[in-house]
Amino acid sequence: MAKLRAVALNWGPTIAFNVVLPWLTYTLLTDRGMSDVAALAVSAVWPAVEVLGILLIRRRLDDFGVLALIVVGLGVLGSLVFQDERLALVKESAVTGLFGLVLLGSLLTPRPLMFYFGRKFGTDGTDEGLARWNDLWQYAGFRRVQRILTVVWGVVYLAEAVVRFALSYVLSTAAMVTISTVLPIAVTAALVTWTIAYGRRSRAAAARNNPAAFAAPQEGVT
Protein backbone atom coordinates (compact mmCIF):
# COMPACT_ATOMS: atom_id res chain seq x y z
CA MET A 1 0.00 0.00 0.00
CA ALA A 2 2.81 2.36 0.86
CA LYS A 3 4.46 1.60 -2.48
CA LEU A 4 1.25 2.37 -4.39
CA ARG A 5 0.91 5.62 -2.47
CA ALA A 6 4.49 6.59 -3.36
CA VAL A 7 3.87 5.83 -7.04
CA ALA A 8 0.64 7.86 -6.99
CA LEU A 9 2.38 10.80 -5.37
CA ASN A 10 5.15 10.54 -7.96
CA TRP A 11 2.92 10.27 -11.02
CA GLY A 12 -0.22 12.13 -10.01
CA PRO A 13 1.26 15.65 -10.18
CA THR A 14 3.33 14.71 -13.24
CA ILE A 15 0.28 13.63 -15.25
CA ALA A 16 -1.78 16.58 -14.05
CA PHE A 17 0.80 19.31 -14.72
CA ASN A 18 2.41 17.87 -17.85
CA VAL A 19 -0.50 16.21 -19.66
CA VAL A 20 -3.99 17.05 -18.40
CA LEU A 21 -3.69 20.76 -17.57
CA PRO A 22 -1.61 21.70 -20.67
CA TRP A 23 -4.03 19.82 -22.94
CA LEU A 24 -7.08 21.44 -21.34
CA THR A 25 -5.46 24.88 -21.51
CA TYR A 26 -4.46 24.48 -25.16
CA THR A 27 -7.89 23.13 -26.14
CA LEU A 28 -9.83 25.84 -24.34
CA LEU A 29 -7.68 28.67 -25.70
CA THR A 30 -7.69 27.48 -29.31
CA ASP A 31 -11.47 26.91 -29.15
CA ARG A 32 -11.78 30.56 -28.18
CA GLY A 33 -9.76 31.71 -31.17
CA MET A 34 -6.25 31.98 -29.76
CA SER A 35 -3.46 31.04 -32.17
CA ASP A 36 -1.65 27.72 -31.83
CA VAL A 37 1.61 29.44 -30.92
CA ALA A 38 0.09 31.56 -28.17
CA ALA A 39 -1.96 28.67 -26.79
CA LEU A 40 1.09 26.39 -26.68
CA ALA A 41 3.11 29.07 -24.96
CA VAL A 42 0.44 29.59 -22.30
CA SER A 43 0.04 25.84 -21.74
CA ALA A 44 3.75 25.66 -20.92
CA VAL A 45 2.97 27.47 -17.67
CA TRP A 46 1.83 24.20 -16.06
CA PRO A 47 5.02 22.16 -16.60
CA ALA A 48 7.02 25.21 -15.54
CA VAL A 49 4.99 25.42 -12.31
CA GLU A 50 5.72 21.77 -11.55
CA VAL A 51 9.43 22.11 -12.30
CA LEU A 52 9.67 25.20 -10.08
CA GLY A 53 7.63 23.60 -7.30
CA ILE A 54 9.76 20.44 -7.19
CA LEU A 55 12.92 22.54 -7.33
CA LEU A 56 11.78 24.60 -4.33
CA ILE A 57 10.38 21.67 -2.31
CA ARG A 58 12.75 18.80 -3.13
CA ARG A 59 15.78 20.81 -4.29
CA ARG A 60 16.04 18.93 -7.59
CA LEU A 61 14.88 19.29 -11.18
CA ASP A 62 11.99 17.14 -12.37
CA ASP A 63 13.17 15.30 -15.50
CA PHE A 64 9.71 14.80 -16.98
CA GLY A 65 8.72 18.42 -16.39
CA VAL A 66 11.83 19.67 -18.16
CA LEU A 67 11.08 17.29 -21.03
CA ALA A 68 7.53 18.62 -21.25
CA LEU A 69 8.88 22.16 -21.53
CA ILE A 70 11.23 21.03 -24.33
CA VAL A 71 8.36 19.38 -26.20
CA VAL A 72 6.18 22.48 -25.83
CA GLY A 73 9.05 24.60 -27.09
CA LEU A 74 9.43 22.34 -30.12
CA GLY A 75 5.69 22.58 -30.69
CA VAL A 76 5.83 26.38 -30.66
CA LEU A 77 8.74 26.27 -33.12
CA GLY A 78 6.81 23.88 -35.34
CA SER A 79 3.75 26.14 -35.34
CA LEU A 80 5.88 29.10 -36.37
CA VAL A 81 7.68 27.25 -39.16
CA PHE A 82 5.04 24.99 -40.72
CA GLN A 83 2.42 27.31 -42.17
CA ASP A 84 1.92 25.56 -45.53
CA GLU A 85 -1.15 23.27 -45.60
CA ARG A 86 0.82 20.12 -46.31
CA LEU A 87 3.62 21.00 -43.96
CA ALA A 88 1.03 21.66 -41.27
CA LEU A 89 -0.02 18.00 -41.59
CA VAL A 90 3.46 16.88 -40.55
CA LYS A 91 4.02 19.50 -37.88
CA GLU A 92 3.58 17.04 -35.03
CA SER A 93 5.88 14.57 -36.73
CA ALA A 94 8.44 17.32 -37.22
CA VAL A 95 8.28 17.86 -33.48
CA THR A 96 9.04 14.17 -32.88
CA GLY A 97 11.86 14.44 -35.42
CA LEU A 98 13.33 17.37 -33.53
CA PHE A 99 12.90 15.39 -30.33
CA GLY A 100 14.79 12.55 -31.98
CA LEU A 101 17.64 14.97 -32.62
CA VAL A 102 17.52 16.04 -28.97
CA LEU A 103 17.77 12.39 -27.92
CA LEU A 104 20.74 11.73 -30.17
CA GLY A 105 22.39 14.97 -29.08
CA SER A 106 22.09 13.89 -25.45
CA LEU A 107 24.56 11.10 -26.22
CA LEU A 108 27.23 13.80 -26.13
CA THR A 109 26.32 14.65 -22.53
CA PRO A 110 27.53 12.72 -19.45
CA ARG A 111 24.24 10.79 -19.28
CA PRO A 112 21.82 10.31 -22.21
CA LEU A 113 18.22 11.39 -22.03
CA MET A 114 16.82 7.86 -21.71
CA PHE A 115 18.66 7.50 -18.40
CA TYR A 116 16.43 10.25 -16.98
CA PHE A 117 13.30 8.78 -18.58
CA GLY A 118 14.14 5.46 -16.98
CA ARG A 119 14.65 7.12 -13.62
CA LYS A 120 11.23 8.75 -13.87
CA PHE A 121 9.32 5.73 -15.18
CA GLY A 122 11.31 3.03 -13.38
CA THR A 123 11.37 4.32 -9.80
CA ASP A 124 8.83 5.35 -7.22
CA GLY A 125 10.20 8.89 -7.11
CA THR A 126 11.52 8.66 -3.56
CA ASP A 127 15.04 9.78 -2.70
CA GLU A 128 15.99 6.16 -2.07
CA GLY A 129 14.61 5.00 -5.40
CA LEU A 130 16.39 7.78 -7.28
CA ALA A 131 19.64 7.03 -5.46
CA ARG A 132 19.43 3.34 -6.39
CA TRP A 133 18.89 4.25 -10.01
CA ASN A 134 21.77 6.74 -10.01
CA ASP A 135 24.08 4.14 -8.46
CA LEU A 136 23.47 1.78 -11.38
CA TRP A 137 25.40 4.17 -13.64
CA GLN A 138 28.64 2.72 -12.28
CA TYR A 139 28.01 -0.49 -14.25
CA ALA A 140 29.20 -0.53 -17.87
CA GLY A 141 26.31 -2.76 -18.95
CA PHE A 142 23.74 -0.35 -17.54
CA ARG A 143 25.42 2.60 -19.28
CA ARG A 144 25.42 0.69 -22.56
CA VAL A 145 21.71 -0.12 -22.26
CA GLN A 146 20.79 3.52 -21.64
CA ARG A 147 22.79 4.64 -24.66
CA ILE A 148 21.28 1.95 -26.90
CA LEU A 149 17.78 2.96 -25.81
CA THR A 150 18.59 6.59 -26.58
CA VAL A 151 19.97 5.73 -30.03
CA VAL A 152 16.98 3.57 -30.98
CA TRP A 153 14.36 6.10 -29.84
CA GLY A 154 16.20 8.97 -31.50
CA VAL A 155 16.70 7.19 -34.83
CA VAL A 156 13.13 5.84 -34.97
CA TYR A 157 11.60 9.26 -34.28
CA LEU A 158 13.80 10.83 -36.92
CA ALA A 159 12.84 8.12 -39.43
CA GLU A 160 9.14 8.61 -38.65
CA ALA A 161 9.46 12.34 -39.31
CA VAL A 162 11.26 11.78 -42.62
CA VAL A 163 8.73 9.18 -43.79
CA ARG A 164 5.72 11.33 -42.94
CA PHE A 165 7.31 14.37 -44.57
CA ALA A 166 7.88 12.39 -47.80
CA LEU A 167 4.37 10.92 -47.77
CA SER A 168 2.83 14.37 -47.38
CA TYR A 169 3.94 15.18 -50.94
CA VAL A 170 2.84 11.83 -52.40
CA LEU A 171 -0.51 11.06 -50.78
CA SER A 172 -3.71 13.04 -50.68
CA THR A 173 -4.52 15.40 -47.84
CA ALA A 174 -7.28 13.07 -46.64
CA ALA A 175 -4.90 10.13 -46.50
CA MET A 176 -2.29 12.18 -44.67
CA VAL A 177 -4.82 13.25 -42.04
CA THR A 178 -5.34 9.56 -41.19
CA ILE A 179 -1.63 8.73 -41.32
CA SER A 180 -0.74 11.75 -39.19
CA THR A 181 -3.12 10.46 -36.53
CA VAL A 182 -2.23 6.77 -36.59
CA LEU A 183 1.52 6.67 -37.36
CA PRO A 184 2.86 8.54 -34.29
CA ILE A 185 0.74 6.38 -31.97
CA ALA A 186 1.85 3.18 -33.70
CA VAL A 187 5.53 4.21 -33.64
CA THR A 188 5.45 5.17 -29.97
CA ALA A 189 3.58 1.99 -29.01
CA ALA A 190 6.15 -0.09 -30.88
CA LEU A 191 9.01 1.73 -29.15
CA VAL A 192 7.48 1.26 -25.71
CA THR A 193 6.85 -2.45 -26.37
CA TRP A 194 10.41 -2.98 -27.59
CA THR A 195 11.85 -0.99 -24.68
CA ILE A 196 10.02 -3.12 -22.11
CA ALA A 197 11.16 -6.37 -23.75
CA TYR A 198 14.73 -5.15 -24.21
CA GLY A 199 14.84 -3.82 -20.66
CA ARG A 200 13.76 -7.17 -19.22
CA ARG A 201 16.40 -9.05 -21.21
CA SER A 202 19.07 -6.56 -20.24
CA ARG A 203 18.11 -6.70 -16.59
CA ALA A 204 18.27 -10.50 -16.59
CA ALA A 205 21.71 -10.41 -18.23
CA ALA A 206 22.91 -7.76 -15.77
CA ALA A 207 21.70 -9.83 -12.81
CA ARG A 208 23.75 -12.77 -14.07
CA ASN A 209 26.87 -10.71 -14.72
CA ASN A 210 26.66 -8.48 -11.61
CA PRO A 211 24.68 -10.38 -8.94
CA ALA A 212 25.90 -8.02 -6.21
CA ALA A 213 24.16 -5.11 -7.92
CA PHE A 214 20.86 -6.97 -7.72
CA ALA A 215 21.15 -8.31 -4.22
CA ALA A 216 18.38 -5.91 -3.17
CA PRO A 217 15.24 -5.29 -5.27
CA GLN A 218 15.77 -2.57 -7.87
CA GLU A 219 12.69 -0.80 -9.16
CA GLY A 220 12.42 -0.53 -12.94
CA VAL A 221 16.09 -1.36 -13.63
CA THR A 222 16.87 -2.01 -17.24
Image (cartoon, rainbow, N blue to C red):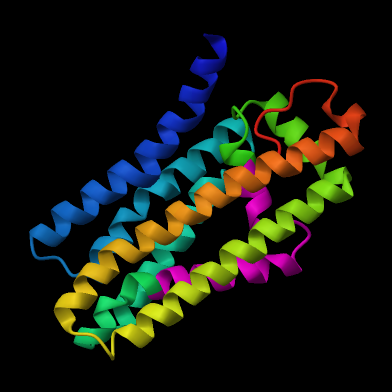
Q: Position of residue 204 (x, y in %)?
A: 77, 36
Horizontal side, residue 203 vs residue 45: left or right:
right
Residue at x-position 9% and y-position 58%: 31
Total marks drawn?
0
Task: Tell me if I can see residue 112 in this picture.
Answer: no
Q: Position of residue 37 (x, y in %)?
A: 27, 70
Residue at x-position 81% and y-position 40%: 205
* Closer-to-camera residue (213/64): 213
- Check the picture and name the quadrant holding the C terminus: top right
Is residue 102 located in the magenta-colored stretch of the structure?
Answer: yes
* Closer-to-camera residue (201/69): 201
Residue at x-position 65% and y-position 33%: 220
Horizontal side, residue 119 vs residue 69: left or right:
right
Q: Position of residue 83 (x, y in %)?
A: 24, 85
Q: In terms of image quadrants, where is residue 161?
A: bottom left
User: Which residues lie in the magenta part?
Assistant: 94-118
Check the image and report above or below for 26 versus 173. above
